[in-house]
Image (cartoon, rainbow, N blue to C red):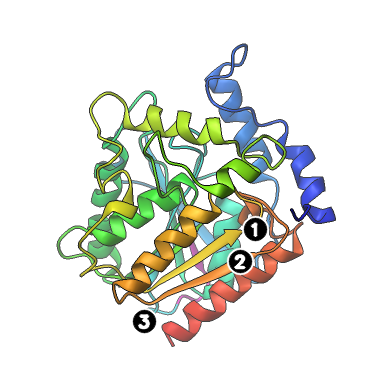
Amino acid sequence: MPSPDPSTKAVLKDLSDVKELNVPGFELSDIRAAYDKVFAAWCAPALQPTNETWVAVEALGEARRCLIVEPVEPDADRPSLIFIHGGGWSLGTALAYAPLARWLSGELNMRVLVPDFPQAPEEEAPAALKALSGLLVWATDRFKSKLVLMGDSAGGNLTAVLSNQPPEGVEIGAQVLLYPVIDLRPDASYRSRKAYGKGKHFLTEPAIIGAAMQYCGATQNPASPLMTPLLETDFSRTPPSWHVLPELDPLRDEGQKYADLLKSKGVKSEVIIAKRTIHGCASFTGRIPEADRCMKRVCETLNQHFS
């Protein structure tokens, strides 16, 4: 079994401050604050200055906003990128992912939108999907552009579902899935979950199952393709897809299985393995060279795709 590279080991020390959901003795508000503190602190510096605004979008719900990061001299012909953040459908904010949004905007010369959206346990599924569907309609109408969807972890799950079943009138030109949660079924069994989900590599298998159960709540069937995109049967609207899968991630195998499924259905699907690093690595491009390499490759391929 490969070991984390030195830069990843250093990040793992910081990530020890982020506790799993529903851990006795820790309030959800404290876990959320720790997550935001760690994830907001690190990303490679942006290539160029950006303009940033916060916009209230009715579809996201009361008191929720969307961060919009734009190049100072935007190209009107470029797509807009919607980044759907991770955090087990319960943690994370647009502010925590602002450094990554700035970096992506510079690398892609694209407008990047990072929405806050309904989170469990206060709002179970399908609240997040409904809110984000409304955001996609709003962004299409506002910017008159094709969209690129990108999401990490639980945000990758939401990205996959929305890319398979986008709202009418919304054109998604590509999706990027960063170590997504693809299989929400409580009895799902993958070798990578067993190998890397024991607590030494940040994300654990119990945390994956617990977060999925909390997100699905009492009303949603985990075996629905709206929860588990691996069970989708209609890929007629699914766009070209790129998948970043860390070698030491419990979610690696289901991510690979989904990438293979898309390819078997005729969808362009490319996998990029981030060697000797962990779940969440994209947020640490300024510290983990392998994450930097993989994210730059994603941006290069997107730039070629939309050239």
Residue 20: give x, y in percent of width and height: 59, 28
Instruction: Determine contact: label 2, label 1, CB under 8 Å.
Output: yes
Residue annotated with mark 2: 273
Q: Residues within 10 Å of mark 3 (few under 14, many from 20)?
A: few
Residue 129 sits above or below residue 75 on the image? above
Q: Secondary structure at mark 2?
A: strand
Q: Would residue 231 be counted in the magenta stretch? A: no
State left or right for residue 207 relative to residue 37: left
| The image quarter in which residue 44 lies | bottom right
Q: Earlier in the sequence, mark 3 or mark 1?
A: 3
Residue type pointed to by label 1: Glu
Q: Which disc, if any, is residue 77?
A: 3
Q: Residues within 10 Å of mark 2 (few under 14, many from 20)?
A: some
Residue 254: give x, y in percent of width and height: 46, 53
Q: CA distance from mark 3 to mark 2?
A: 31 Å
Q: Earlier in the sequence, mark 3 or mark 2?
A: 3
Q: What range of the chain is rendered magenta?
A: 69-74
Q: Secondary structure at mark 1?
A: loop
Q: Which disc, if any, is residue 247?
A: 1
Instruction: Determine contact: label 3, label 2, CB under 8 Å.
Output: no
